[in-house]
Image: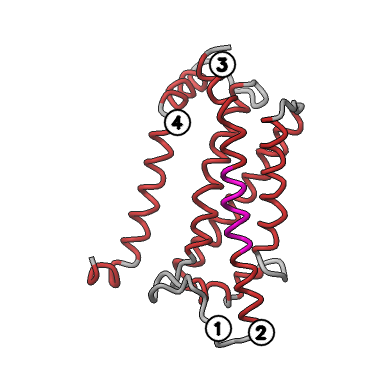
Amino acid sequence: MNVKNWKLQKVLPWILIIGGIAATYCAFILTLDKFKIAENPNFIPSCNINPIIACGNVMQSSQAKAFGFPNPFLGLIGYSVVITIGVTILAGGKFKRWFWLAVNTGLLLATIFLSWLFVQSLYQIHALCPYCLGVDAVTIPMLWYVTLYNIDQKYIRLPKGKAQKAYGWVRRHHLDILILFFLIIVAWILKHFWYYYGKHL
């Protein structure tokens, strides 16, 4: 086992635990605020910071209940499972290949759903929820590192040749790629809402 695999194996449970706790906390706050809005339509959530960063607008949109119930309910369940997986690994638990592929698939589906919500927030709702962005900010690294772990462990098999060489480069620059991705997202947000932020920066 090379050093990079060993390091990822050691840090992965912490990525899942910390990321899962952060996402669960965000989902919990959104759930509480959702109940408060249901009780009092005039309730203003604390995360309504300005016309752009305003989770109240997002929570009252149709996209906030994409499956017929508040989206944070999914987060409370899903990220609690992620925390449990991380704690189990930290305690010495081992999982089979099918389980890791299921975790990878679950995080991928969560990321696709969150990406759809992000685009909807930008172009349809015209407001961003800071807690939703917080969930995005931890889900993407969890998906990224679980995917790298699965490739390292040969649970996801790459074809020989150029694909493996490309992966070697990706593995060496895994953090650089992640940071670049987030910088692109921040630039995208600023560009889209420059009509507002351009006046206040």
Q: Distance between the residues labelled 4 and 1?
A: 42 Å
Q: Which of 11 and 63 is in front in this view?
A: 11
Return the x and y of residue 141 as percentages of the image width and height. Answer: 52, 41
Q: How is the image coloured?
A: secondary structure
In the rendered view, would you say 29 is above or below 166?
A: below
Q: Verify CB contact (< 8 Å) between mark 4 and mark 2.
A: no
Which label sits in the foreground, 4 or 3? Answer: 4
Q: In which quarter of the image is the N terminus?
A: top right
Could you tell me the amino acid type at mark 4? His
Q: Residue at x 36, y 54 (%)?
A: 186
Q: Verify CB contact (< 8 Å) between mark 1 and mark 2.
A: yes
Q: Verify CB contact (< 8 Å) between mark 2 and mark 3.
A: no
Which label sits in the foreground, 1 or 3? Answer: 1
Could you tell me the amino acid type at mark 3? Lys
What residue sits right under mark 3 in the picture? Answer: 160
Q: Residue at x 53, y 22 (%)?
A: 7
Q: Distance between the residues labelled 4 and 3?
A: 20 Å
Q: Quadrant of the C terminus?
A: bottom left
Asked which secondary structure carries label 2, the reply is: helix
Q: Residue at x 58, y 36 (%)?
A: 14
Which residues lie in the magenta part? 18-28
